[in-house]
Image (cartoon, rainbow, N blue to C red):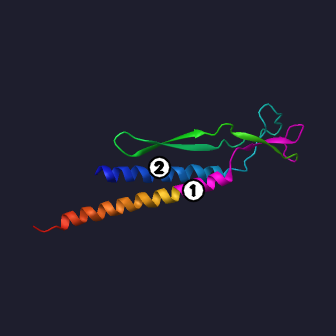
Amino acid sequence: MSSILSIAASGLAAASRRLEVSASNVANALDNGPLPGAPNPTGAPPAYVPQRLDQTAVAGGGTATTVTNVSPSYVPSYDPTAPYADKNGQVAAPNVDLASEAIQQITARYAFAANAKVLQVGADLMKTLLDIKT
């Protein structure tokens, strides 16, 4: 595979991974849990730990992604009805910013489309080269 096509393929994979991470964060944005150190008489699981994607250039062309946990992973939130709320009614809510996640998803969409177009143009160029008559 030519370097242009391999670069575009790595871009497609990165965009797909970006969307996957963001979708997981959005889907679990309401998965609260007890604050660390707070009593948990019901044995509720901890709050969802959101993730972030870092994208870096690869020597020779292309891109690589690394997924890490967001820090801090939770923010205190008021929910006195939760059985695992502390004495002040606080629970741990995932530190997910829905506006940022929307931007991540839009970024993934455009990056995927751009890289797919590069692959299409590369295939068309290859076809044109093979169709040249001597």
Residue 117 on the magenta span: no
x and y percent of residue 16 in the render?
A: 49, 53
- Report if residue 45 is visible in the image: no
Q: Quadrant of the C terminus?
A: bottom left
- The residues bearing labels 1 and 2 have C-alpha atoms spaced at a distance of 12 Å
- Kind of residue indicated by mark 1: Gln
Sequence-wise first label, 1 or 2: 2
Residue at image coords 59%, 43%: 52
Residue 97 on the magenta span: yes
Q: Which of 91 and 39 is in front in this view?
A: 91
Q: Which element is circle 1 on?
A: helix
| Farthest-out residue, left | 134
Q: Name the residue under label 1.
A: 105
Asked if 61 appears above or below 132 in the picture, the reply is above
Q: Give the range drawn in magenta.
A: 81-107
- Kind of residue indicated by mark 2: Ala
Q: Nearer the viewer, residue 83 or 19?
A: 19
Asked if 134 appears above or below 37 in the picture, the reply is below
Q: Which element is circle 2 on?
A: helix
Residue 14 numbered tag = 2
Tell whether 82 sits left or right of 67. right
